[in-house]
Image: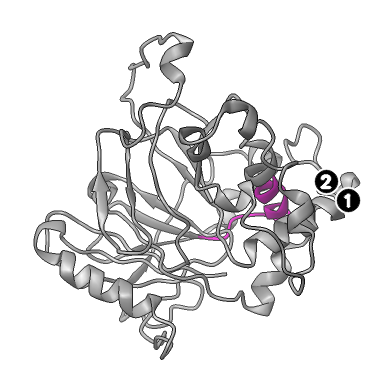
Amino acid sequence: MAKMAASVVVESGEDVFRKMFKFYKRRDPPPDLREVTDFSSGAASGGKIVPVKLDPAAVSDEEAACVGLQPVRNWRAFGLQGYPGFIFISNPFLRGSQAFWVRQCLKTYPQKPNVCNLDMHMSPSDTQDIWARSVQALRTPASVKRQPKTLLERLRWVTLGYHYNWDTKVSLQVYFRTAVFKVKTPTAMFMHSGDVMLMSGQSRLLYHAVPRILPALPQCATLLEELSCASALQTGSVLEPVSQEDWDVCSRYIQSSRVNVTVRQVLGPGQRFPEEPKSALQPRDEGQTVGCHDDGNSGKRKRTCSDPVETIET
């Protein structure tokens, strides 16, 4: 599985951005990927990739391992010339730990009281257990014709933090980002499974779009094996073994969809969210959203009023 990313000015560069989005989205003929930057190999970077040194003391080895991450000193981090605040981390996950987080995003996080896009159109009772209502159909062999999309396949986003509503679509995987200050030619880049993008400072003004999912390279695909050995888990780890039954459903899902975890800081030092009654945490009227997202089909950006603390987008 791989993505790509780019940077353009919204006001004057939107057409350039959209043109590149459509280029990588097209099926016939398929796009030429030789100009796509690959941080794992340095390919097609044009010398723009620069190494970034991280503070190994920022997170202890024990804390990192508890959530399935390698020690920070082993992380491979990079920046791009001309993109201050942008950091790309090549898959910092321990082998086998991605499977746990994929299952969390698909099975655990959509559970109530978390809010998802389906709540805008369905009653809470109908979205009470999205996983249980979907697994039987997802276990059906691909060669067998089945009913319309399951709730899990219709899931677009789940919010875990401060209330946030947005309407989006599953975008097939290529990654783009838009800067507001300088006109730049869009930069396409691969994101392999487990890769992390950090945008701070000026790069926080960048946005992305994902026009296509690419088949994972064999060496990358093996990193998504199930986490089945409980004895290998560190004491205090939040990770749990993933059963073969659960992983069969997850692996079927990610063959055609992506799982994206977004974490955004929305408060400054010393700030706190206002206390809200429970009723305020219910979905708003349809069409009214907070935060911003990309329309996966058109490459257009929809801007609204604030960002979420954490959103799981599928």
Tag 2: amino acid: Pro
Q: Is residue 119 magenta?
A: no
Residue 180 percent coordinates (x, y): 15, 54
Question: For the view shown, which residue lies furthest in the left direction?
Answer: 12
- Residue occupied by mark 2: 241
**Can you say which quadrant of the picture contains the N terminus?**
bottom right
Would you say the residues marked 2 and 1 are in contact, meaning their CB atoms lie under 8 Å apart? Answer: yes
* Of 172 and 135, the residue lying toward us: 135
Residue 181 in view (yes/no)? yes
Where are the magenta residues, as a range? 90-103
Quick one: SS at disc 1?
Answer: loop
> Residue 57, position in %: x, y?
53, 40
Task: Report whether 246 appears left or right of 125.
Answer: right
> Distance between the Cα atoms at labels 2 and 1?
6 Å
Which residue: 48% across, 36% down? 121
The picture places residue 109, in percent across and down from the top left corner, at 62, 36
- The residue sitting at 23% across, 68% down in the picture is 17
- For this view, does 127 lie left or right of residue 245? left
What residue appears at the point 62 percent right and 44 percent down from the top-left corner? 105
Which numbered mark, 2 or 1, is in the foreground of this view? Answer: 2
Amino acid tagged 1: Cys
As drawn, the label of residue 229 is: 1
- Circle nearer the N terminus (2, 1): 1
The local secondary structure at tag 2 comes to loop
In the image, residue 138 above or below residue 167: below
